């Protein structure tokens, strides 16, 4: 799959890719590359104090980034891969940018292209929606492109999959007991 190789190459070089997901279009970048993450914030016009969610390829990668209890892991194995972002306590000393100091919002997507990209890239990816901060996220590539048209900061690659069926992921805070739904 040529598009996959191109997307991986661009992300490895610090670029930002608009990519379809199992929910809406997302802005993907290497979450371990400070300049790439800063570019995501610039493209989205997102406030720096609003952390970015992260895509990971599998539960093992999620465990390397978070303090995952057995109970949380069992819960996540039932809902991942899928359209649920989990907020978890993050491990200290990680080279991750754009995430909160003590927590991390993370998910394994259920979308073939994106999951393949995450597996080939083999590092955490930013998993934020491809929209200007405060504007609606969209599964329609035409709406997404319209939001970024004429803006100073642009993504380096756009993967067009037409219209996606989804809406933004559900967000669940697993750091509380009981777990708390932050976004339905």
Image (cartoon, rainbow, N blue to C red):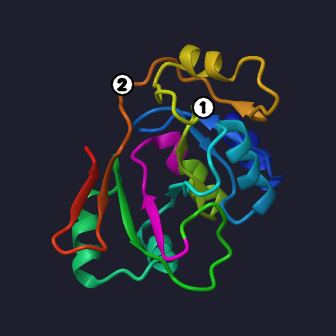
Residue 112 painted magenta: yes
Q: Give the residue at mark 2.
A: 165
Q: Residue at the location (60% across, 49% down)?
A: 117
Q: Is residue 92 above or below residue 44?
A: below
The residue lying furthest to the left in this view is: 178
Mark toward the start of the polypeptide (1 vs 2): 1
| Magenta residue span | 101-115
Q: 172 or 10, which is in the foreground?
A: 172
Q: Which numbered mark, 1 or 2, is in the foreground of this view?
A: 1
Q: Is residue 147 above or below residue 85?
A: above
Q: Is residue 1 shown to the viewer in this render?
A: no
Image quarter (top left, top right, bottom left or bottom right) of the C terminus? top left
Image quarter (top left, top right, bottom left or bottom right) of the N terminus? top right
Q: CA distance from mark 1 to mark 2?
A: 20 Å
**Dot 2 crowding, Cα within 10 Å, few <14, some 14–19, many 20+:** few
What secondary structure is marked by label 2? loop
Q: Is residue 138 above or below residue 90?
A: above
What secondary structure is marked by label 1? loop
**Dot 1 crowding, Cα within 10 Å, few <14, some 14–19, many 20+:** some
Residue 119 location in percent, x, y?
A: 57, 58
Residue 60 location in percent, x, y?
A: 45, 75
Q: Judge left or right: residue 100 versus residue 139.
A: right
Q: Give the residue at mark 1.
A: 132
Q: 25 or 80, which is in the foreground?
A: 25
């Amino acid at each position: 799959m040529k598009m996959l190789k191109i997307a991986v190459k661009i992300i490895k070089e610090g670029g930002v890719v608009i990519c379809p997901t199992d929910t809406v279009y997302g802005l993907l970048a290497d979450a371990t590359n400070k300049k790439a993450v800063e570019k995501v914030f610039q493209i989205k016009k997102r406030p720096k104090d609003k952390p970015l969610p992260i895509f990971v390829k599998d539960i093992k990668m999620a465990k390397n980034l978070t303090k995952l209890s057995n109970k949380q892991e069992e819960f996540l194995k039932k809902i991942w891969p899928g359209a649920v972002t989990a907020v978890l306590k993050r491990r200290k000393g990680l080279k991750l940018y754009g995430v909160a100091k003590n927590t991390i919002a993370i998910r394994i997507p259920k979308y073939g292209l994106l999951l393949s990209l995450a597996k080939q890239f083999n590092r955490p990816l930013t998993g934020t929606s491809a929209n200007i901060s405060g504007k609606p996220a969209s599964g329609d590539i035409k709406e997404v492109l319209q939001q970024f048209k004429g803006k100073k900061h642009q993504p380096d690659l756009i993967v067009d999959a037409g219209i996606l069926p989804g809406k933004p992921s559900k967000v669940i805070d697993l750091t509380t007991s009981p777990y708390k739904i932050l976004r339905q």
